[in-house]
Image (spheres, rainbow, N blue to C red):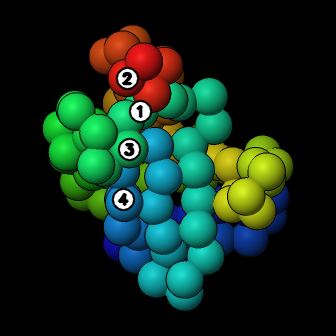
Amino acid sequence: MIIMANKSKKYTRKVKFTDGDSGTYSDGTKFRLSNVRAPESNQSGGSKAKKVASGMVGRSKSRVNIEEVGRDKYGRILVNMKNKDGSINERLRKKGYTNKGR
């Protein structure tokens, strides 16, 4: 489960990563981590990137603050995720997820 904060509202949703920088909420809404560029699931390193992102959410006992910051050109919600260890987006970038594997 994730605690999602959107301005003054908080609600709970399950999240499933489809690759290292995007996923789907339990209600079917698609999201993408802002400023993170991980390989697609079918590209080299994509499976590992998905495990890393999922693990960061899982290690926080699945309680994550999510800030919606816009939409991408595909209509997905762009988000910043934070847990007790800080920004998940920033930690993924520090691990090298900045260029989609190219």
Q: Are marks 1 and 2 in contact (CB under 8 Å)?
A: yes
Residue 72 x, y percent position in the rendering: 76, 49
Q: Nearer the viewer, residue 90 or 85?
A: 90
Q: Secondary structure at mark 1?
A: loop
Query: Which badge, 3 or 2, comes first in the chain's sequence?
Result: 3
Checking the image for residue 101, the label placed there is: 2
Q: Nearer the viewer, residue 90 or 40?
A: 40
Q: Nearer the viewer, mark 1 or mark 4?
A: 1
- Residue of label 4: 17
Query: Which badge, 4 or 2, comes first in the chain's sequence?
Result: 4
- Work out how far the residue at label 1 is from the one at label 2, CA to CA, in angstroms: 7 Å
Residue 44 x, y percent position in the rendering: 22, 33
Residue at coordinates 48% horizontally, 52% vertically from top-left? 22
Name which residue type carries label 3: Glu
Name which residue type carries label 2: Gly
Q: Is residue 19 above or below residue 89?
A: below
Q: Nearer the viewer, mark 1 or mark 3?
A: 3
- Work out how far the residue at label 3 is from the one at label 4, CA to CA, in angstroms: 11 Å
Q: Is residue 91 above or below residue 89?
A: above
- Residue of label 3: 40
Q: Is residue 84 visible?
A: no
Q: Quadrant of the C terminus?
A: top left
Q: Secondary structure at mark 2?
A: loop
Q: Are marks 4 and 2 in contact (CB under 8 Å)?
A: no
- Work out how far the residue at label 1 is from the one at label 4, CA to CA, in angstroms: 12 Å
Name which residue type carries label 1: Ala
Query: Which badge, 3 or 4, comes first in the chain's sequence?
Result: 4
How packed is label 2: few (under 14 Cα within 10 Å), some, or many (20 or more)? some
- Work out how far the residue at label 3 is from the one at label 2, CA to CA, in angstroms: 8 Å
- Residue of label 1: 38
Q: Secondary structure at mark 4?
A: strand
Q: How many marks?
A: 4
